[in-house]
Image (cartoon, helix red, strand yellow):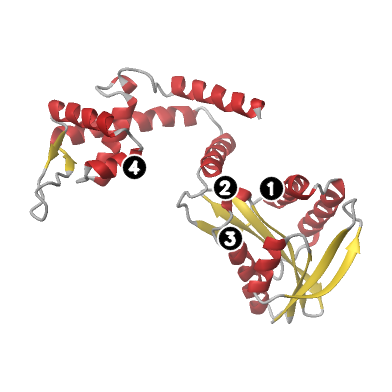
Amino acid sequence: MNQAIDAIRTFNRFFTRHVGAIDARFLDTDANLPEARLLFEIARLGPVLANVLQAELGLDRGYLSRMIARFEERGWVARDRLDSDARARPIRLTQAGQAAFEEIDGRQRDAVAHDLERLSATERDDLVQALTRARLLLDRQAPDAFTIRDARVGEVSQVAARQSVLYAESHSWGHGLEVVEAETTAAFLRNSDAERERCWVADLGGVMAGAVFLTDEGEGTARLRLLHVEPFARRRGIGDALVAGCLDFAREKGYRQVVLWTHTVLEAARRIYARNGFECIDTQVHHTFGEPVQGETWRAEL
């Protein structure tokens, strides 16, 4: 824990210096960083009431009032009155305020572009994914919408790695599971038929938030494999969407049934399978992962 705390604090110190967060003149403009952020929100939401801005930014009411007063002194904002409520005075940018906003916004974009231009395409993608993942880890209620897409180069192998890490933490399943997953993904990459087999990825803000495989078992049977959803992306319906997508694809390709192997201890996954029409048809204890664990075979008739 201490190492994680130190890492985050070290990054915060670097980033506040990197973006000029404590400069009196943010990006050499007439605003500091809190004022620039407030100006952005007024531009985005305006006309907007002060209490909405307070909730959006999490600012102390008195601090917000003083910033708005400074904006009025500079001629950046004006307060209107509503005919329906004389007490309500929405805040909007004036022409001068819009010009100030556009200057700050343009300089921010230029500064970010300068950082990105020094990176290769792969490094830019790594940075965007790292920042998005950090945001989603710290804000589990972020309103980002997910999409389901085909796996890209490198992601099939990532599924095995991520599942190995997640199950090692949650159930202490070690290299035995990792071997099964590595062999499964390697066989898929080597032998899969793109017309009848797929790996789908749940994409959340450009980050892999989960995945699932469907493979051809022969004689009209398909197998759902390696379903997982990242902890930061759960309770968004991703697991159900991945399973439903597998079943839709299987029907489209003429499979008669879809089977899968799971474990009794994986209660959340079992609920997803049951909601989507699967039934447990067999159980058997095995030692593949080290300690004895009860495996289950489930089937959905199409």
Q: What is the distance, in whole Å, between disc 1 and disc 2 at their CAs? A: 13 Å
Q: Is residue 198 visible?
A: no
Please give the residue where the numbered disc 2 appears in the rendered image. 207
Q: What is the distance, in whole Å, between disc 3 and disc 2 at their CAs? A: 13 Å
**What residue lies at 57% left-to-right and 47% top-to-bottom?**
207
The disc, 3 or 4, on the residue closer to the chain's N-terminal end is 4
**What residue lies at 45% left-to-right and 23% top-to-bottom?**
16
Q: Secondary structure at mark 3?
A: helix
Q: What is the distance, in whole Å, between disc 3 and disc 4 at their CAs? A: 27 Å
Report the front residue among 18 and 82: 82
Report the front residue among 120 and 183: 183
At label 3, which amino acid type do we have?
Ile
Task: Count neighbours of disc 1 (C-alpha within 10 A) and say few if under 14, some if 14 to 19, many if 20 or more.
Answer: few
Where residue 1 sits, quadrant-wise, is top right
At label 2, which amino acid type do we have?
Val
Where residue 98 sits, quadrant-wise, is top left
Q: Is residue 285 visible?
A: yes
At label 1, which amino acid type do we have?
Gly
Residues tagged 3 and 2 counted as in contact (Cβ below 8 A): no
Q: Is 284 on the left-hand or right-hand side of 37? A: right
The disc, 4 or 2, on the residue closer to the chain's N-terminal end is 4
Please give the residue where the numbered disc 4 appears in the rendered image. 56
**What residue lies at 12% left-to-right and 46% top-to-bottom?**
87
Q: Secondary structure at mark 4?
A: helix
Please give the residue where the numbered disc 3 appears in the rendered image. 238
The disc, 1 or 2, on the residue closer to the chain's N-terminal end is 1
